């Protein structure tokens, strides 16, 4: 998942958690 890597690289852990939660909620 390249988007996760970009979040980590930019230090956006809060946004990453929000993205992951919405991603799994949609499955």
Image: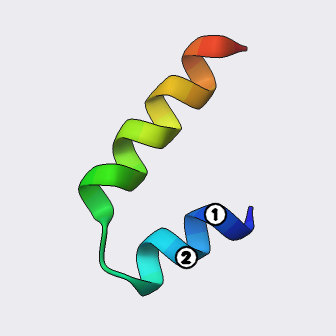
- Residue that sits furthest to the left in the current view: 14
* Left or right placement of residue 24 versus residue 8 in this view: right
Q: Residue at x 47, y 40 (%)?
A: 19
* Left or right placement of residue 9 versus residue 11 in this view: right
Relative to 6, does residue 19 appear above or below in the rendering?
Answer: above
Question: Which residue in the structure is indicated by mark 1?
Answer: 3
For the residues marked 1 and 2, what is the alpha-carbon distance in whole angstroms? Answer: 5 Å
Q: Residue at x 58, y 63 (%)?
A: 4
* Left or right placement of residue 8 versus residue 24 in this view: left
Q: Residues within 10 Å of mark 1 (few under 14, many from 20)?
A: few
- Residue that sits furthest to the top in the current view: 26
Do the residues under discs 1 and 2 have CB atoms within 8 angstroms?
A: yes
Q: From the top left corner, tell me how far across and down residue 6 is, in percent.
A: 55, 76
Relative to 26, does residue 18 appear above or below in the rendering?
Answer: below
Relative to 13, does residue 24 appear above or below in the rendering?
Answer: above
- Residue that sits furthest to the bottom in the current view: 9
Quadrant location of the C terminus in the rendered image: top right
Quadrant location of the N terminus in the rendered image: bottom right
Question: Which residue in the structure is indicated by mark 2?
Answer: 6
* SS type, badge 1: helix
Which colour style is shown?
Answer: rainbow
Q: From the top left corner, tell me how far across and down residue 12 is, in percent.
A: 31, 68
* Left or right placement of residue 10 versus residue 7 in this view: left
Q: Residue at x 43, y 76 (%)?
A: 8
Q: Residues within 10 Å of mark 2 (few under 14, many from 20)?
A: few
Q: From the top left corner, tell me how far across and down residue 21 is, in percent.
A: 45, 29
């Amino acid at each position: 998942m390249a988007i996760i890597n970009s979040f980590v690289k930019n230090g956006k852990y809060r946004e990453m958690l929000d993205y992951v939660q919405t991603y799994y909620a949609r499955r």
